Image: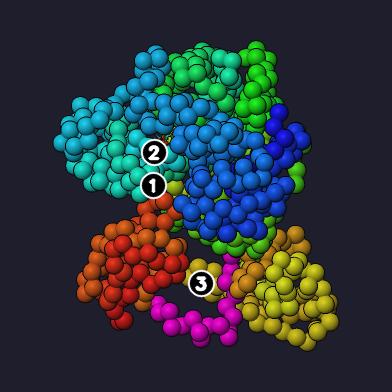
Amino acid sequence: MFSKILIANRGEIACRIIRTARRMGIATVAVHSDADAGALFVREADEAVRIGPAPVGESYLRGDRIVEAALATGAQAIHPGYGFLSENPGFVDLVTAAGLVFIGPSAASIRAMGLKDAAKELMEKAGVPIVPGYHGAGQALVLLAGKAREIGYPVLIKARAGGGGKGMRRVEHPDGFADALASAKREAKAAFGDEAVLIEKYVEKPRHIEVQVFGDNFGNAVHLFERDCSAQRRHQKVIEEAPAPGMTAEMRAAMTDAAVTAAKAIGYSGAGTIEFIVDASEGLRPDRFWFMEMNTRLQVEHPVTEMVTGVDLVEWQLRVAAGEKLPLSQDEIRLSGHAFEARIYAEDPTRDFLPAIGTLHHLKFPASGAEGSSIRIETGVRQGDAISPFYDPMIAKLVVHAGDRASALDALVDALESTEVAGSTVNTAFLAALARDPDFSAGDVDTGLIARRQAALTAIAQPSPASVAAAALAASGASLLKTGADPWDALAGYAHWSPVRRTVTLAYGESETIAAVHAKAGRLLVEIDGAERSVPPASRVAVWPGHVTVFEGSVAHSFKVPDPFADAADAGGGAGSLRAPMPGLVKVVRASAGEHVSKGQALLVLEAMKMEHTISAPHDGEVAEIVAEGQQVTDGAVLVRFVET
Ligand code: ADP
Ligand code: ADP
Ligand code: MG
């Protein structure tokens, strides 16, 4: 076994790998960008090496610097995690040429599965069912449009180099084909530097069911059952589970056989996932699943498999890479209970899941699961850390396990309700709403579920009167507090100033509440609109610069507490301007100065965090000024200025 490994990744997955390495007595080396110098994974590793500035192209994608760091620190092997260089065969070549071990499959296996078109061809030859469609070399618009018609609408245009749901467009009708193709190609070019696409039949009532496979260097390959990842937004997974709801013995046998056949066809070694798309319009049928792609790495959602099999997949990766045989045979791998993983992201579900940034001024995860369940938090951040625009906005993965699906789902909801994040917008309320959705609860999932229910799943209830009162009370003491301090402790001395009456203003969305806080007979009371309200002692509140957040179930209600002194300085920003919600690149500009636009009209497309975001007019008006195409903008930069009316 290795005595020291380097982890060529960051965040939660770097922390995850360090944990197993430490348990196995293996020393770890972290590599990091400037933005991550103080990150948790850097702290947890035995050694750390700086590899460059924040942008990934200058740090986490610099294979040369990473290999240098491994040689300099005496690491014998490199674990790539997921994303970044994990599926880059050129990096594997670089690692092996330096005499180091790549903890993952061979460069040849990655190449075979790297492009979706070539992978489909290969799988078809191996006898694995593939999604009907076109995956040829010709890329002319007329050819592709003709193929789409032959395949039959709806179709799915996919970047052959795609990943993470990027470069993918569903097209309903021939009229929309050319535009969708151009947009898919643009996104693919930006994200992968390769604009070639394939076209697939859009499967009806699609379910995403994938099989975890594992191979070693002795020709053995096993599966570790399936995961269902049908709960998706923007083709990206949100809640994953194992096993798949409604799975039958017959369907499982067919899918796991196909997966092991696929792995064996390329002599696969290490952890891999075979992703299948399933037509569930008539339940799970062995003749209705098709190979989509293979991910030749550890998957983000690997913990659900670990929870139901008891296998540590990172340990297996290390053993196999070090030349050991697979620790268990197929018969020895058993399925037990049910597990869910929910991805907690800094994003705003009410704004079409727009990624968010911010400082996690308050961060609290549940310590343990309810009786009969267990809980596992995978995170790479601590309270006080920032979610920066440079990397994936994932804050944590909440993983729960229980004896059956219903209990595991209850445990997931409980865990989401006791998670507290303030300082950035988060999707916890959305995740809890999804977990409680009647169809999701019944196991009747498909990849369109979230989009169909988007309005209901992202609707946020108004804060209760008790929450408003709790916010007012905390805000009235806020000036006495330091961020992160317990507001109730700091308020303890408040009652001594009995005659004091403080007025606070709380802004929630568009509405403002003025509350008065005073002490009466040793108790603190909040008065809003002339009515006295008491604050429930169990209120969960976090105070952070300029804000108070009250946690009500899985919902984090954040109130702005305007600072009367800061307001004047801010006024110049202008209500008549539209600002960038995050740093990004102005990809397309659809309006010009002097133009009258109406509320909701698309004004420009901002590319940020490798996704395209359409920025629309917040109200009717006339454009006075608009940014230029190709311009790089910072967070809060003015994109559009409207003529003052
Ligand atoms: P998976 O297929 O493993 O579930 P996703 O589809 O959610 O992964 O994400 C797709 C890809 O996005 C990942 O393989 C990885 O390339 C990238 N990605 C997601 N999160 C991160 C992260 N925290 N760091 C680096 N890359 C990431
Ligand atoms: P990526 O590399 O981005 O993960 P995939 O090919 O794995 O791309 O597809 C991502 C998601 O898109 C799938 O999980 C599924 O929800 C949806 N999808 C892909 N292909 C099809 C298809 N042919 N029909 C319906 N949905 C599909
Ligand atoms: Mg995929």
Question: Which residue in the protein does label 2 denote?
Answer: 162
- Residue drawn at 57 percent across, 45 percent down: 68
Q: Does the magenta stretch include residue 571?
A: yes
Please state which of residues 640 and 204 is positioned toward the viewer in this rendering: 640
Please tell me which residue is depicted at 25% across the width and 30% down the height of the picture.
Answer: 137
Q: Under 8 Å from ligand 2: the CB of mark 2?
A: yes
Q: What stretch is highlighted in magenta?
A: 553-575
Coordinates of residue 67 in the picture (x, y in percent): 56, 43
Q: Are marks 3 and 1 in contact (CB under 8 Å)?
A: no
Local SS, label 2: loop
Q: Are marks 2 and 1 in contact (CB under 8 Å)?
A: yes
Query: Residue 62 location in percent, x, y?
Result: 50, 48
As drawn, is 185 to the left or to the right of 584?
left
- Which quadrant of the figure shows ligand 3? top left
Circle 2 crowding by C-alpha within 10 Å: few under 14, some 14–19, many from 20: many
Residue 511's label in the rendered image is: 3
For badge 3, the amino acid type reads: Ser
Q: Name the residue under label 1.
A: 191
Query: Is residue 593 part of the magenta span, yes or no?
Result: no
Q: Can residue 410 be seen in this view?
A: no
Check the image and name the residue furthest to the left: 142
Mark sitting earlier along the chain (2/1): 2
Q: Is residue 62 left or right of residue 590?
A: right
User: Is the CB of mark 3 within 8 Å of ligand 1?
Assistant: no
